[in-house]
Image (cartoon, grey):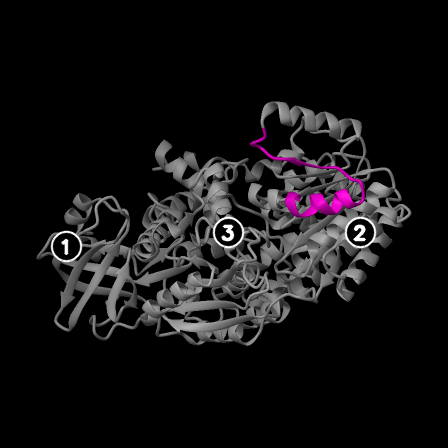
Amino acid sequence: MYTAAVAFLTRPGMSLRPSLLDPLFAPAAVLPGAGPKMAALLDRLLGTPETPARVVDLLFHLPHGGVARALKGSIAEAPTGEPVTLAVQVVAHRPPQAVGGRRPYRVLVEDGSGDISLVFFNMPRARLEKMLPVGARRYVSGRIELWDGFRQMVHPARILDDKGFSELPAVEPLYGATEGLTSRAIGRLAQGALERLPDLPEWQDPAWLAQNRWPAFAEALRAEHRPDKPPPAEGEPPPGTRRRLAYDELLASQLALALVRSRMRRAPGRINAGDGEMSRRIEAALPFRLTGAQIRALAEIRGDLRSDRRMLRLLQGDVGSGKTAVALLAMASAIEAGRQAALMAPTEILARQHAERLRPLAAAAGLTLALLTGRDRTAERRATRASLLDGTIPIAVGTHALFQEEVAFRDLGLAVVDEQHRFGVHQRLALGSKGEAVDILVMTATPIPRTLALTCFGDMEVSVLDEKPAGRQPIATRLVSSERLDEVVAGLERALARGDRAYWICPLVAESEFIDLAAAEERCADLRQHFGDAVGLVHGKMPGRDKDEAMERFAAGTTRILVSTTVVEVGVDVPEATIMVIEHAERFGLAQLHQLRGRVGRGTGASTCLLVYRGPLGQVARARLEMMRETEDGFRIAEEDLRLRGEGEVLGTRQSGLAAFRLARPEADGDLLRAARDDARLIVERDPALRSERGRALRILLYLFERDAAVKLLGAG
């Protein structure tokens, strides 16, 4: 039973985190140099809404690269796309000409071989003039790229004078940062976090460590944060220190799963299916016939609902494969049995979209559907809650508002979680606890290779929708050099004249929402020079109501081009949108490109996706873009992403949190994943209570990687 498994891991002796780990789970604000302002920035970068950043979060925020102190030749000789350090002289400052915009500030520097522009977004002029006085000699580090044929370096990783350069370590680690918190500041805090590392027992098998020549856990962490040589180039194997840490995290995950599996096969449930009458009415009202994949998935789901064991099933379907229709028919089965159903979406936009799509179909079966979000008026919310409690509303669609304590159901039988990776453990647990023996169906539109599905979703049963409903239009995907951007704009003019609409996704500039936003605002301003008020803008920093209004204006056709940053889920279904422009496409992962492309091709018109790239392309980036041009099969794309092991993650961006790994990369560490699964199985067979010397050390491992929460996740509901 789930409850028994959770009880095992939360009984005396395992319910409290070992005091040995207390220094690592202290707030990051205790570290030297982390004042209130710095702590707030750390919370934004590494914390969650429930938990501020902690010391352990800094330790697990490993550098993504490193800059060697050695100079890398001259400007003319320096390679593009790789970290370089150059000795230059400051020639001129070129502040942006536009007033009130967020155009970049450029500083021209040179050496005897040529010149290069240093590009800054949202940086005060006085600060730049102080860092880079005209005529001064400076050492700059970063990646060179070509922009309209000219060399540039966006936000150099470091800018030093002669004294600063002489004091540099051999290799300076580079960390993912956020606005106001530099990589160097993170590095200083990480050194303080290393000082708090306690003396931890070894939880790995000694023979396995010796076979792989891996160091101790603490030694591996120190080596990652204090590198003595640059990181391996793309395609080269990672160092043993990184592999050691990845295996620790994978073993914690697999051990948590194995402990649960050893103590239950499924929690007891209730039979949750009726006579099928409501389902038949809904199916008759659908504007399309169910595909073979949808019929197969429904049979699997209804088999679970008829069982006296609780359902925990993943419905995995590509973009446009018809997951929502399957979810509604599953909810109808629960309602036929006299129970209620709820569908939880990660954003208000998606929740409203689901409600609008499902309400007329539910009405065909005589069912009332209520929408519950955080922005409902007090009176509306009170009336909805009362109707859910007395059972007069059988279906609730909503956001996080559904699992608030004051929301109660008469008899919740089925909970459907859309884009489930966007929710935290506690949120899903809260929804699953809203009724007695609630069946859980989680959905994802990200095609996931089988290996990763096992890793990320534990022992969930998996249903796959691998067909598209009839009528879905193919999408012509083309690669376009950024040097031909004027042709793209001219093409948009012709498309808008035909009545079409277009998405324009802005480039992923840096791991900073502020910088991404600046790029989006600049692109929006440029497009408005051509199209005026027909251009709308939506981004993650907008208030929810403003974001909804921007999306609604686009859906209504008031705006015809929607410019968006990468941090916002473009989830509105707009059949008139037939063009998707993705700028700087080479910086995106395959899965993210595939998801974005799926926003078009939803109507009767021919659709096009333009992948605008900036050359020269590396081998992996070119392979990604060619794969997008070749196929729309999301499962093939996912497998190819796994094979390429490139920067873009199989499961979307690293921030999505789907895999919940911070040190391991399952798509690159598949061999370690298999070893960890075998190791975990042996551990549970030989020491199911974790009472041996290694078992006690493994308990510490579970808490260090917070897999107590992962165990509860498997028992959601």
Closest to the observer, 634 or 488: 488
Helix, strand or loop under label 1: strand
**Relative horizontal placement of residue 250, taking residue 436 as reference (left or right):** left
- The x and y percentages for residue 233 are 41, 71
Pointer 1: residues within 10 angstroms few (<14), some, or many (20+)? some
| Amino acid residing under circle 1 | His
Name the spot of residue 34 as percent of width and height, x first.
37, 37
Q: Which residue is mark 1?
A: 93
Residue 265 visible to the viewer: no
Camera-near label (3 vs 1) is 1
Image point (64%, 60%), residue name: 320
Instruction: Please give the range of residues in magenta.
Output: 355-376
Distance Cα–Cα, label 2 vs label 1: 66 Å
Q: Residue at x 40, y 47 (%)?
A: 190
The three-letter code of the residue at mark 2 reads Ser
Looking at the rendered structure, which numbered label has been put on residue 655?
Answer: 3
Question: Viewed as shown, does residue 338 lie left or right of 670?
Answer: right
Amino acid type shown at disc 3: Gln
Reply yes or no: does residue 532 show up in magenta: no
In the image, residue 360 lies in the stretch drawn in magenta: yes
Depth check: 648 or 247 in front?
Answer: 648
Q: Earlier in the sequence, mark 2 or mark 3?
A: 2
